[in-house]
Amino acid sequence: MRITQGTFSFLPELTDEEISAQINYALGQGWACSVEYTDDPHPRNTYWDMWGLPMFDLRDAAGVMQEVKACRATFPRHYIKVNAFDSVRGFETMRLSFIVNRPPHEPGFRLTRQEAHGRVQRYVMASYAGERPEGERYGAQE
């Protein structure tokens, strides 16, 4: 199951050149880029681990790509994304976020139905990856 979170998630994987083009666009807008990673991509897990610090003063995509490549080398079986943050007063929010690395196998999620009082039914979504301890969710690290 392919996780579809963030911009471009329904498109085929972006090449490094296409990633650089998107980063250049974000930097051209004055947005600060950062790199994050996780091995639990549950849609409500909005707090991924940050790789390094946000790059507020960067003006060239090569610096962000260097961080992406370093994160990929360290966590080849994790989800990695690039974020572009707009720090302009009044916005101060994420303007762009897209996945740049995925594990070779994405196990997906299961939907569990819970019966409640009366005829109420609740649905809970759980990641298959979350059944294994952190660091072991996508197999042994290389």
Image (spheres, grey):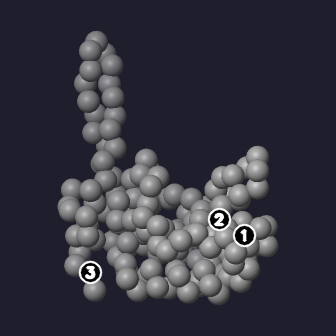
Q: Spatial distance from mark 3 to mark 1, Cα to Cα? A: 32 Å
- Badge 1 marks a residue whose secondary structure is helix
Q: Spatial distance from mark 3 to mark 2, Cα to Cα? A: 28 Å
**Cβ–Cβ under 8 Å for marks 2 and 1:** yes
Q: Nearer the viewer, residue 81 or 34?
A: 34
Which residue carries the number 3 mark? 141
Q: Residue furthest top?
A: 118
Who's the residue at 32% across and 38% down the image? Answer: 124
The 10 Å Cα crowd at callout 3, few under 14, some 14 to 19, many 20 or more, is few
Which residue carries the number 2 mark? 84
Q: Nearer the viewer, residue 62 or 54?
A: 54
* Vertical placement of residue 140 versus 37, above or below: below
Which residue carries the number 1 mark? 26
- Badge 2 marks a residue whose secondary structure is strand
Given the image, on which type of amino acid does mark 2 rest?
Ala
Q: Spatial distance from mark 2 to mark 1, Cα to Cα? A: 6 Å
* Vertical placement of residue 68 versus 115, above or below: below
Which of the numbered marks, if any, corresponds to residue 111? none
| Res 64 quadrant in image | bottom right
Q: In the drawing, does residue 5 fall left or right of residue 22? A: left
- Badge 3 marks a residue whose secondary structure is loop
Q: In the drawing, does residue 75 fall left or right of residue 118? A: right
x%, y% of residue 80? Answer: 47, 71
**Cβ–Cβ under 8 Å for marks 3 and 2:** no
Who's the residue at 53% across and 82% down the image? Answer: 67
